[in-house]
Image: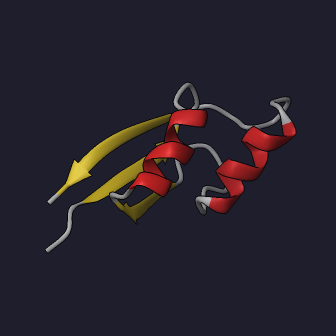
Amino acid sequence: MAEQVKVTLVKSAAHRLPKQRAIVKSLGLNRVSSTVTLPDNEATRGAIFKIAHLVTVEVVK
């Protein structure tokens, strides 16, 4: 089974660059403390890298 990552928004996306706000929304994160489980692939990793200062990431097996 493929690994997944659990992404939690820890800082608000308000007052951030529009691209960063769009990435937060596209990942399915709505408000601070919201968590979503996503597949661990290059596209997800790239999106997380762009907003790394706003989220925490855990690898889920």
Write the residue at 60% across / 56% down. Answer: 29
Name the image quarter holding residue 37: bottom left
How many numbered circles does the render carry? 0
Write the residue at 47% across / 54% down. Answer: 44
- The C terminus is located in which quarter? bottom left
Write the residue at 56% across / 46% down. Answer: 47
Name the image quarter holding residue 56: top left
Q: Is residue 34 above or below residue 3?
A: above
- The N terminus is located in which quarter? bottom left
Left or right, residue 42 beside residue 14 = left
* Most distant residue in the bottom direction: 1
Residue 51: in sight, yes or no? no
Write the residue at 61% across / 31% down. Answer: 11
Left or right, residue 22 beside residue 56 = right
- Rendered location of residue 38, percent (x, y): 40, 63
- Rendered location of residue 7, percent (x, y): 43, 49
- Rendered location of residue 22, percent (x, y): 76, 51
Q: Is residue 58 above or below residue 17?
A: below
Out of 60 and 1, give the one closest to the viewer. Answer: 1
Residue 43: in sight, yes or no? yes
- Rendered location of residue 25, percent (x, y): 70, 57
Left or right, residue 24 beside residue 6 = right
* Most distant residue in the top direction: 53
Left or right, residue 37 beside residue 18 = left
Out of 12 and 41, give the one closest to the viewer. Answer: 41
